[in-house]
Image (cartoon, grey):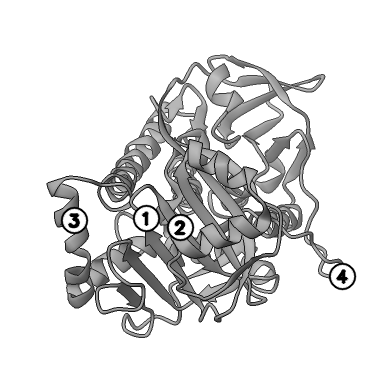
Amino acid sequence: MSVDYDVAVVGAGPIGLAAAILIARQSGIAPARVAVFDRRPPDSLDRSKELPIDLRVFALSRASEKILRAADAWSDIAATRAEAFERMHVWHADVPPHGGDALVFDAAEMGERNLGVIAENSVLQASLAGAARRAGIALVTGDISALEQERDAVVLLAGEKRVRVKLVIGADGAQSRVRELAGLGAARADYGQTAIVAMVSTARAHEHTAWQRFLGDGTLAFLPLKDGHSSIVWSVPTARAERLLAISPEAFERALESDFDGALGKVKLASERLTFPLWRLSANAYVTARVALVGDAAHVVHPLAGQGANLGLLDAAALADVLADGVKTREDPGAERILRRYERWRRAENDLMSSAIDAFDRLLARGTGRIAEIAQRGMPWVGRSTIAKRMFIERAMGLAGELPAAAR
């Protein structure tokens, strides 16, 4: 029996769209044989209209920039409210923000033009949607309500349509329906924290710098935006987050200034405040028969290092690579050998990053006791070591580890 598509990506977020485009552009699978399914596929970016502000932002690494260039989306992203940051300024609550004990990473010291780019989720999504349509990829409206794995295909129930495909890619987020329907369980651990996100103005300019303070009970980041505002990600115990949301905007601003130790002077809210709970997730397996997971469907990490979207884009590029290798040898895109290679590759990289981020949260952001004290006191030493700083920056920029072709 014939199939409708070779590859069906479920989820039209940035990771799912990137995966579809890279597969269509690089793997040898024709774009007309690739489809993206979503309950509401996004519109393409229209530069003649102002895109509404999205409070969810990503710190895109150099590797992510390269992947998005390969997906034909970077020019639209860079032209739409994207802000490059040239420095990272990190300090612990026990030291002053502008003293010699703060940890500063500077792009110029590393021979880089910048350390990354801050961009809104909606900008990425709209830019990638446009690139997908230009590539000839179908964006199909429909929730996936059933998934039946056959020997030579997967049958999806998308709305009222039955669709047969050779490979299903679950890019439908942390609450992945594909993961559930395919019987791929996940280990989940609650951090007991909630992140508050908002846009703020500050008395001092953000200096094209990503600022982060380890608080003792969480983390506070100020990320630079194009118009001089900053995006905050304030991760604190859930009970405290609830109290912060219950107080007046003026009291919230005072608490925010205090937790940020006045690093950028007076702070003023410039948007509503949104929250999301923080937890870690790792799928028990990234693949099964003719199904693969990417992005948050496979793994969720703490936002303190800003690596969630970057890891997902590396997943998308790695999966495109292994599918391209399979097509060259005339293997079925859903062949288990291909998918297992993807799983081994990306699980090793993602688990390493997830463990490192957990250690930062446990020892630097919320740590108590002797080991945490040693880690916190070691931050200035990292700042004085060129080798240590380069190692941190290369990993943060996605320039270390086993990289897919699009990220090199």
Closer to the camera, 302 or 327?
302
Element type at mark 3: helix
Residue at 78 percent across and 37 percent down: it is 140
Spatial CA distance of label 1 from label 3 is 14 Å
What residue does disc 1 label? 215
Closer to us: mark 4 or mark 1? Answer: 1
- Identify the image quadrant of residue 98: bottom left
What amino acid does circle 1 point to? Leu
Residue type of the residue flagged with mark 3: Ala
Residue at which label 4 appears: 48
Q: Looking at the image, do the residues carrying marks 3 and 4 touch, with CB atoms under 8 Å apart?
A: no
Q: Which of labels 4 and 2 is toward the front?
A: 2
Which mark is drawn over residue 220?
2
Please tell me whether mark 2 sits on a helix, a strand or a loop: strand
Is residue 406 in view from this perspective?
no
Question: Which numbered mark, 1 or 3, is in the foreground of this view?
Answer: 1
Q: Position of residue 133 (x, y in %)?
A: 76, 53
* Circle 4 SS class: loop
Marks 3, 4: nearer the viewer: 3
Q: Nearer the viewer, residue 151 or 197?
A: 197
Sequence-first tag of 3 and 4: 4
| Residue 348 percent location from the top left of the image | 30, 41
Which circle's residue, 2 or 1, is located before the other in the chain?
1
- For residue 325, the mark is none
Residue sitting at x 26%, y 72%: 390
Question: Which residue was labeled with disc 3?
Answer: 375
In whole angstroms, how far apart are the C-alphas of marks 2 and 1? Answer: 7 Å
Q: CA distance from mark 3 to mark 2?
A: 18 Å
